[in-house]
Image (cartoon, rainbow, N blue to C red):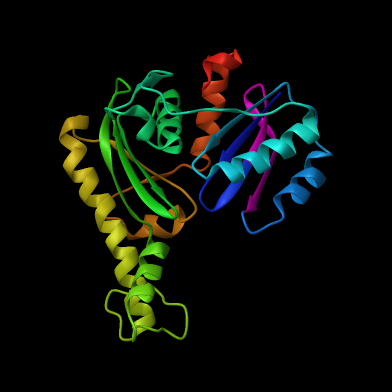
Protein backbone atom coordinates (compact mmCIF):
# COMPACT_ATOMS: atom_id res chain seq x y z
CA UNK A 1 0.00 0.00 0.00
CA UNK A 2 1.12 3.55 -0.77
CA UNK A 3 0.13 6.67 1.16
CA UNK A 4 -0.42 9.58 -1.25
CA UNK A 5 -0.33 13.20 -0.02
CA UNK A 6 -1.68 16.28 -1.82
CA UNK A 7 -0.64 19.50 -0.06
CA UNK A 8 -2.76 22.18 -1.72
CA UNK A 9 -3.13 25.86 -0.96
CA UNK A 10 -6.37 25.36 0.96
CA UNK A 11 -6.32 21.77 2.16
CA UNK A 12 -4.22 18.70 2.79
CA UNK A 13 -5.75 15.68 1.07
CA UNK A 14 -4.48 12.14 1.36
CA UNK A 15 -5.38 8.59 0.40
CA UNK A 16 -4.08 5.07 0.88
CA UNK A 17 -3.65 3.29 -2.42
CA UNK A 18 -4.05 -0.49 -2.46
CA UNK A 19 -3.58 -1.83 -5.98
CA UNK A 20 -5.80 0.39 -8.13
CA UNK A 21 -8.18 1.51 -5.36
CA UNK A 22 -8.15 4.18 -2.68
CA UNK A 23 -9.05 2.20 0.44
CA UNK A 24 -8.79 5.06 2.93
CA UNK A 25 -9.09 8.80 2.35
CA UNK A 26 -9.03 12.02 4.34
CA UNK A 27 -8.63 15.79 4.18
CA UNK A 28 -8.01 18.69 6.57
CA UNK A 29 -7.92 22.44 6.12
CA UNK A 30 -4.68 24.12 7.10
CA UNK A 31 -6.47 25.85 9.99
CA UNK A 32 -6.77 22.47 11.73
CA UNK A 33 -4.25 21.12 14.22
CA UNK A 34 -2.61 19.03 11.52
CA UNK A 35 -0.21 17.13 13.80
CA UNK A 36 -2.99 16.07 16.17
CA UNK A 37 -5.54 15.27 13.48
CA UNK A 38 -3.13 13.17 11.43
CA UNK A 39 -1.81 11.30 14.46
CA UNK A 40 -5.36 10.44 15.54
CA UNK A 41 -6.55 9.34 12.11
CA UNK A 42 -3.42 7.55 10.92
CA UNK A 43 -3.22 5.51 14.13
CA UNK A 44 -6.15 3.50 12.74
CA UNK A 45 -4.75 3.06 9.22
CA UNK A 46 -2.78 0.11 7.83
CA UNK A 47 0.97 0.52 7.41
CA UNK A 48 1.95 1.80 3.95
CA UNK A 49 5.11 0.56 2.28
CA UNK A 50 5.81 3.97 0.69
CA UNK A 51 4.71 7.56 1.17
CA UNK A 52 4.64 9.90 -1.83
CA UNK A 53 3.63 13.55 -1.72
CA UNK A 54 3.02 16.53 -3.97
CA UNK A 55 3.15 20.01 -2.51
CA UNK A 56 2.45 23.58 -3.58
CA UNK A 57 2.82 24.96 -0.05
CA UNK A 58 5.75 26.23 2.03
CA UNK A 59 8.50 24.15 3.59
CA UNK A 60 7.07 24.55 7.10
CA UNK A 61 3.84 22.79 6.17
CA UNK A 62 5.69 20.11 4.20
CA UNK A 63 7.83 19.49 7.28
CA UNK A 64 4.82 19.27 9.60
CA UNK A 65 3.21 16.62 7.40
CA UNK A 66 6.49 14.73 6.98
CA UNK A 67 7.00 14.62 10.76
CA UNK A 68 3.45 13.34 11.27
CA UNK A 69 3.98 10.64 8.63
CA UNK A 70 7.26 9.57 10.19
CA UNK A 71 5.70 9.32 13.65
CA UNK A 72 2.73 7.35 12.36
CA UNK A 73 4.41 5.01 9.90
CA UNK A 74 8.16 5.12 10.53
CA UNK A 75 9.28 6.71 7.27
CA UNK A 76 9.09 10.06 5.55
CA UNK A 77 7.41 11.11 2.32
CA UNK A 78 9.26 11.37 -0.96
CA UNK A 79 8.18 14.64 -2.57
CA UNK A 80 7.47 14.65 -6.29
CA UNK A 81 8.95 17.73 -7.99
CA UNK A 82 7.84 18.79 -11.44
CA UNK A 83 10.02 17.22 -14.15
CA UNK A 84 10.53 18.00 -17.81
CA UNK A 85 8.90 14.70 -18.73
CA UNK A 86 7.33 11.78 -16.93
CA UNK A 87 4.58 9.20 -17.37
CA UNK A 88 4.19 10.18 -21.02
CA UNK A 89 3.61 13.89 -20.30
CA UNK A 90 6.06 16.48 -21.66
CA UNK A 91 6.22 19.78 -19.77
CA UNK A 92 5.95 22.95 -21.91
CA UNK A 93 7.89 25.13 -19.47
CA UNK A 94 11.49 26.03 -20.35
CA UNK A 95 12.16 25.85 -16.60
CA UNK A 96 10.13 22.71 -15.82
CA UNK A 97 10.19 23.07 -12.03
CA UNK A 98 8.26 26.35 -12.28
CA UNK A 99 5.12 24.54 -13.40
CA UNK A 100 3.07 23.60 -10.35
CA UNK A 101 3.38 19.92 -9.57
CA UNK A 102 -0.40 19.79 -9.08
CA UNK A 103 -0.91 20.87 -12.69
CA UNK A 104 1.64 18.35 -13.96
CA UNK A 105 0.07 15.47 -12.04
CA UNK A 106 -3.40 16.42 -13.29
CA UNK A 107 -2.07 16.00 -16.82
CA UNK A 108 -0.49 12.67 -15.88
CA UNK A 109 -3.90 11.51 -14.68
CA UNK A 110 -5.67 12.83 -17.80
CA UNK A 111 -3.29 11.07 -20.17
CA UNK A 112 -3.42 7.78 -18.25
CA UNK A 113 -7.23 7.91 -18.13
CA UNK A 114 -7.52 8.46 -21.89
CA UNK A 115 -8.93 12.00 -21.70
CA UNK A 116 -6.28 13.63 -23.93
CA UNK A 117 -6.47 15.77 -25.97
CA UNK A 118 -8.01 17.98 -23.33
CA UNK A 119 -8.21 21.31 -21.58
CA UNK A 120 -7.69 20.99 -17.83
CA UNK A 121 -9.13 23.66 -15.55
CA UNK A 122 -8.60 23.62 -11.80
CA UNK A 123 -10.77 26.00 -9.79
CA UNK A 124 -9.59 26.75 -6.28
CA UNK A 125 -7.53 29.52 -4.72
CA UNK A 126 -6.17 30.02 -8.23
CA UNK A 127 -7.76 29.20 -11.55
CA UNK A 128 -5.27 27.26 -13.65
CA UNK A 129 -5.72 26.19 -17.27
CA UNK A 130 -3.60 23.78 -19.28
CA UNK A 131 -3.78 22.28 -22.77
CA UNK A 132 -2.62 18.68 -23.24
CA UNK A 133 -2.49 17.11 -26.69
CA UNK A 134 -3.20 13.50 -27.65
CA UNK A 135 0.48 12.59 -27.42
CA UNK A 136 0.90 13.90 -23.88
CA UNK A 137 2.53 17.16 -24.92
CA UNK A 138 1.71 20.08 -22.66
CA UNK A 139 1.10 23.09 -24.91
CA UNK A 140 1.00 25.69 -22.13
CA UNK A 141 -1.59 27.34 -19.94
CA UNK A 142 -2.94 30.33 -18.04
CA UNK A 143 -3.15 31.29 -14.35
CA UNK A 144 -5.67 33.67 -12.76
CA UNK A 145 -7.23 34.25 -9.35
CA UNK A 146 -10.01 31.84 -8.48
CA UNK A 147 -13.51 33.28 -8.02
CA UNK A 148 -13.27 33.60 -4.24
CA UNK A 149 -9.82 35.16 -4.39
CA UNK A 150 -11.12 37.63 -6.99
CA UNK A 151 -13.84 38.70 -4.57
CA UNK A 152 -11.36 39.05 -1.72
CA UNK A 153 -9.12 41.17 -3.93
CA UNK A 154 -11.95 43.58 -4.69
CA UNK A 155 -12.90 43.84 -1.02
CA UNK A 156 -9.27 44.43 -0.03
CA UNK A 157 -8.73 47.20 -2.59
CA UNK A 158 -11.95 49.18 -2.18
CA UNK A 159 -13.63 51.17 0.57
CA UNK A 160 -17.30 51.17 -0.36
CA UNK A 161 -17.72 47.66 -1.79
CA UNK A 162 -18.85 46.04 1.44
CA UNK A 163 -21.63 43.49 0.87
CA UNK A 164 -23.52 42.57 4.02
CA UNK A 165 -24.39 39.04 2.88
CA UNK A 166 -23.01 36.35 0.58
CA UNK A 167 -23.83 37.00 -3.05
CA UNK A 168 -25.55 34.79 -5.62
CA UNK A 169 -24.67 34.46 -9.29
CA UNK A 170 -27.28 36.25 -11.40
CA UNK A 171 -27.48 37.34 -15.03
CA UNK A 172 -28.14 40.95 -13.97
CA UNK A 173 -27.47 41.68 -10.33
CA UNK A 174 -29.36 44.48 -8.54
CA UNK A 175 -27.23 44.65 -5.38
CA UNK A 176 -23.55 44.75 -4.47
CA UNK A 177 -23.29 41.26 -3.00
CA UNK A 178 -24.77 39.58 -6.06
CA UNK A 179 -22.91 41.90 -8.40
CA UNK A 180 -19.54 41.01 -6.90
CA UNK A 181 -20.22 37.28 -6.84
CA UNK A 182 -21.67 37.28 -10.34
CA UNK A 183 -18.82 39.27 -11.84
CA UNK A 184 -16.10 37.09 -10.36
CA UNK A 185 -17.70 33.72 -11.07
CA UNK A 186 -18.67 34.73 -14.60
CA UNK A 187 -15.18 36.09 -15.24
CA UNK A 188 -13.69 32.71 -14.38
CA UNK A 189 -16.24 30.90 -16.52
CA UNK A 190 -15.49 33.20 -19.45
CA UNK A 191 -11.76 32.59 -19.02
CA UNK A 192 -12.21 28.81 -19.19
CA UNK A 193 -14.38 29.19 -22.32
CA UNK A 194 -11.88 31.54 -23.94
CA UNK A 195 -8.94 29.23 -23.20
CA UNK A 196 -10.79 26.23 -24.62
CA UNK A 197 -11.65 28.22 -27.76
CA UNK A 198 -8.06 29.44 -28.23
CA UNK A 199 -6.49 26.01 -27.77
CA UNK A 200 -9.08 23.91 -29.64
CA UNK A 201 -7.38 24.06 -33.05
CA UNK A 202 -4.04 22.94 -31.60
CA UNK A 203 -5.82 20.08 -29.81
CA UNK A 204 -7.55 18.72 -32.89
CA UNK A 205 -10.74 20.76 -32.77
CA UNK A 206 -12.82 19.08 -30.07
CA UNK A 207 -10.82 18.63 -26.88
CA UNK A 208 -12.39 17.32 -23.73
CA UNK A 209 -12.74 20.06 -21.11
CA UNK A 210 -12.30 18.90 -17.52
CA UNK A 211 -12.86 20.79 -14.28
CA UNK A 212 -11.20 19.95 -10.98
CA UNK A 213 -10.58 21.74 -7.71
CA UNK A 214 -12.80 22.65 -4.81
CA UNK A 215 -15.04 25.05 -6.72
CA UNK A 216 -15.42 23.02 -9.92
CA UNK A 217 -19.04 22.01 -9.33
CA UNK A 218 -20.09 25.64 -8.83
CA UNK A 219 -18.32 26.87 -11.96
CA UNK A 220 -19.40 24.08 -14.32
CA UNK A 221 -22.99 25.28 -14.95
CA UNK A 222 -21.74 28.75 -15.88
CA UNK A 223 -19.70 27.54 -18.86
CA UNK A 224 -20.93 27.67 -22.43
CA UNK A 225 -19.82 24.11 -23.18
CA UNK A 226 -20.15 20.65 -21.72
CA UNK A 227 -17.43 19.80 -19.23
CA UNK A 228 -16.35 16.76 -17.28
CA UNK A 229 -15.94 17.06 -13.51
CA UNK A 230 -12.81 15.18 -12.44
CA UNK A 231 -12.10 15.23 -8.68
CA UNK A 232 -8.84 14.36 -6.94
CA UNK A 233 -6.65 14.77 -10.02
CA UNK A 234 -3.48 15.21 -7.97
CA UNK A 235 -4.04 12.03 -5.95
CA UNK A 236 -4.93 10.14 -9.13
CA UNK A 237 -1.84 11.50 -10.86
CA UNK A 238 0.29 10.49 -7.88
CA UNK A 239 -1.12 6.96 -8.13
CA UNK A 240 -0.03 6.77 -11.78
CA UNK A 241 3.37 8.21 -10.89
CA UNK A 242 3.86 5.75 -8.03
CA UNK A 243 3.26 2.77 -10.27
CA UNK A 244 5.70 4.11 -12.87
CA UNK A 245 8.43 4.97 -10.36
CA UNK A 246 9.14 2.11 -8.03
CA UNK A 247 12.37 3.43 -6.52
CA UNK A 248 12.54 6.48 -4.27
CA UNK A 249 15.53 7.99 -6.03
CA UNK A 250 13.44 8.39 -9.18
CA UNK A 251 10.88 10.69 -7.59
CA UNK A 252 12.49 13.99 -6.80
Q: Give the magenta part as a residue range.
A: 14-29
- Closer-to-camera residue (231/165): 165
Image x and y of residue 24, in percent: 72, 37
Q: Is residue 251 above or below residue 173?
A: above
**Residue placed at 43% from the left, 60% from the top?**
218
Q: Is residue 81 above or below residue 25?
A: above
Residue lying at the far front in this picture: please name it. 60
Q: Is residue 126 above or below residue 139?
A: below
How many labels sit on residues?
0
Is 119 a magenta residue? no
**Residue placed at 47% from the left, 28% from the top?**
81
Image x and y of residue 50, in percent: 68, 22
Which of the 4 image quadrants contains residue 2?
top right
- Closer-to-camera residue (121/95): 95
- Closer-to-camera residue (61/105): 61
Query: Quick check: 169 left or right of 165?
Result: left
Query: Quick check: 103 left or right of 7?
Result: left
Q: Is residue 126 above or below residue 250?
A: below
Residue lying at the far right in this picture: please name it. 44
Image x and y of residue 99, in percent: 36, 35
**Residue placed at 52% from the left, 45% from the top?**
57
Quadrant of image for the N terminus: top right
Magenta span: helix, strand or loop, mainly? strand
Image x and y of residue 105, in percent: 45, 31
Query: Quick check: 207 left or right of 201?
Result: right
Amino acid sequence: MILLLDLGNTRLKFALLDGDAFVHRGAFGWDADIAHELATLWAEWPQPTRIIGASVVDTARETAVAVAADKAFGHQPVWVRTPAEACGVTNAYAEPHRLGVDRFLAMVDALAAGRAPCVLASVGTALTLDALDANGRHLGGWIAPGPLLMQQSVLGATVQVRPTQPGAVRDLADNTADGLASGCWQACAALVDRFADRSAAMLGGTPTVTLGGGDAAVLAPLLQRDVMLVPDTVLRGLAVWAKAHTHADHFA
